[in-house]
């Protein structure tokens, strides 16, 4: 049986891979289990030496793989090529950070000398989404491998070709069984989680995360979950309104809104709301939408008709309940959803509570900081949040928010070495950065009398 891949912009068939029968999953896991001791025995330096050559391959094949990525999931070609290049350009620094995080540590108190080790768990199941189909596997597979685990990767069934290409590049010099890929949909994912794995690292929806956590609990498997978001942007009375609007345009509509930290809810002080809305609408209206392969495209299609339908249904339900269309909400065609800005919303509407994952910005006017914070925190999600405002004022507001990552006058991504972390129902564990890398390893201590 084949898993076919179709271009979401044109409907053309991009290619196909063989579906991995769910019954074969235990065999893959057994091969990973058999390969793991020798992989762990290489040590950090040995594992790094086999992984690092992939940097040159990612760089040399960036245009080719970027074009494949665009064809499979629709994002603009420039962004797709950049996603591939980032895996190569940042690999050496990332490996440095991983080695630093995973090296043994010495602890002494005068009576006892303790070595703290970061040992592999064994076999890691990595399950990744389609919206960043090279970057997301990279964020999970790389730390798992460097920690000495072997990995079985189950990428999204929407983007199997670029996922296979990722495994081919990263695994070019790896021993057999160290990095394997299985292709399929829900049946394959369930089979992998229930198989004899030691760690499940997942990025995807909250609902899928609940199922994974429930199944993993049967064997007390370690779990790292990055789940959905409903990220707020707070625009305070003293904000730079043009800068805030430019950020909202970029962060609400990038990748057609198919980003876990997209700005989906905007709470703007009523004294500056008119100015902000005009700037937001003008910026969004100027975006060029089309096939990601076409020059100048800034907003591509949704991944498929199901996701496009979800977004359109949310918009229509909000309008039926009294939301005002400030831009868009019409002219949708195929998998393309017109960049849309809505106003006059309230938290009774589904579009303010359920993740949209599409090119929609929802604007709510508020009387002051207290209202903005209360509404921003009125969500089961807590991945990212952004505050635009002046200096200490913006920081005081930011510290009242319940998201895991908060940006002030910028996006949520932290400095090099910062973790990628969600709060509330947006995360269970976290990854990236020193602390995140260590979640892919078992902490073990060996103590002896101090000499």
Image (spheres, grey):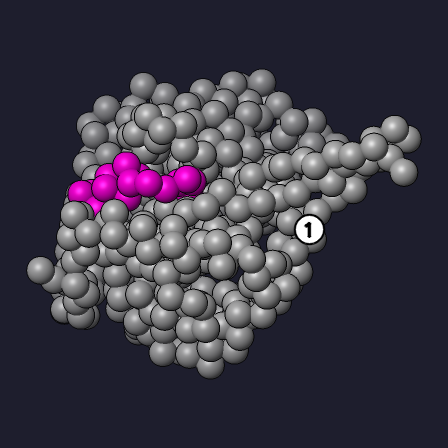
Q: Is residue 312 left or right of residue 407?
A: left
Task: Tell me where residue 364 appears, x and y as whole percent.
Answer: 43, 29
Quadrant of the rendering where the C terminus is positioned: top right
Task: Tell me where residue 12 appears, x and y as whole percent.
Answer: 14, 69
Task: Tell me where residue 121 appears, x and y as whole percent.
Answer: 49, 42
User: Image height check: is 336 above or below 428?
Assistant: below
Secondary structure of the residue carrying tag 1 is loop
Task: Tell me where residue 205 appears, x and y as whole percent.
Answer: 33, 37
For mark 1, what is the residue? 103
Any part of residue 267 in sight: no
Q: Nearer the viewer, residue 59 or 77?
A: 59
Within the magenta stretch, is there residue 200?
yes
Residue 109, quarter of the rendered image = top right
**At 57% across and 61% down in the image, what residue appears?**
42
Q: Is residue 195 left or right of residue 423?
A: left
Q: Nearer the viewer, residue 148 or 163?
A: 148
Residue 107, quarter of the rendered image = top right
Q: How many residues crowd around disc 1 within 10 Å: few (fewer than 14), some, or many (20 or more)?
A: some
Q: Residue furthest bottom?
A: 60
Q: Nearer the viewer, residue 120 or 289?
A: 120
**At 30% across and 71% down in the image, what residue appears?**
68
Number of residue marks: 1
Q: Is residue 250 left or right of residue 352?
A: right
**Span colored in magenta:** 185-202
Residue 265, quarter of the rendered image = top left
**At 36% across and 21% down in the image, what residue appears?**
347
Q: Is residue 147 left or right of residue 219?
A: right
């Amino acid at each position: 049986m084949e898993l076919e891949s179709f271009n979401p912009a044109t409907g053309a068939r991009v290619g196909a891979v063989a579906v991995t029968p769910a019954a074969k999953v235990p065999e893959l896991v057994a091969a990973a289990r058999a390969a793991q001791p020798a992989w762990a025995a290489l040590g950090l330096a040995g594992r790094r030496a086999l992984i690092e050559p992939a940097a040159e391959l990612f760089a040399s094949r960036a245009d080719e793989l970027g074009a494949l990525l665009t064809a499979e999931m629709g994002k603009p070609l420039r962004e797709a090529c950049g996603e591939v290049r980032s895996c190569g350009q940042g690999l050496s620094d990332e490996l440095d950070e991983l080695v630093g995080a995973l090296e043994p540590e010495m602890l002494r108190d005068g009576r006892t000398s303790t070595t703290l080790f970061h040992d592999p768990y064994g076999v890691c199941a990595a399950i990744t989404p389609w919206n960043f189909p090279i970057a997301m596997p990279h964020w999970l597979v790389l730390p798992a491998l460097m920690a000495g685990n072997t990995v079985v990767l189950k990428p999204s069934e929407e983007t199997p070709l670029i996922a296979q290409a990722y495994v081919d590049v990263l695994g070019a010099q790896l021993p057999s069984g160290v990095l394997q890929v299985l292709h399929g949909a829900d049946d394959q994912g369930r089979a992998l989680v229930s198989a004899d794995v030691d760690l499940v690292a997942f990025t995807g929806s909250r609902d899928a995360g609940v199922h994974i956590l429930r199944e993993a609990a049967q064997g007390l498997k370690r779990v790292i979950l990055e789940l959905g978001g409903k990220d707020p942007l707070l625009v305070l009375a003293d904000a730079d309104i043009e800068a805030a609007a430019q950020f909202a345009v970029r962060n609400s509509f990038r990748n057609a809104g198919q980003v876990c930290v997209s700005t989906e809810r905007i709470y703007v002080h009523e004294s500056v709301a008119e100015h902000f809305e005009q700037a937001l609408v003008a910026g969004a209206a100027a975006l060029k939408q089309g096939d990601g392969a076409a020059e100048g495209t800034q907003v591509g299609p949704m991944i498929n008709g199901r996701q496009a339908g979800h977004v359109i249904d949310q918009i229509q339900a909000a309008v039926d309940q009294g939301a005002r269309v400030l831009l868009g909400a019409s002219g949708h065609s195929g998998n393309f959803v017109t960049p849309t800005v809505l106003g006059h919303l309230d938290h009774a509407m589904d579009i303010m509570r359920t993740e949209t994952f599409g090119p929609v910005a929802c604007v709510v006017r508020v009387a002051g900081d207290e209202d903005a914070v209360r509404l921003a925190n009125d969500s089961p999600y807590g991945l990212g949040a952004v505050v635009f405002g002046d200096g200490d004022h913006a920081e005081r507001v930011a510290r009242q928010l319940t998201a895991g990552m908060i940006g002030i006058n910028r996006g949520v991504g932290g400095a090099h070495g910062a973790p990628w972390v969600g709060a509330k129902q947006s995360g269970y564990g976290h990854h990236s950065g020193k602390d995140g890398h260590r979640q892919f390893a078992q902490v073990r201590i060996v103590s002896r009398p101090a000499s």
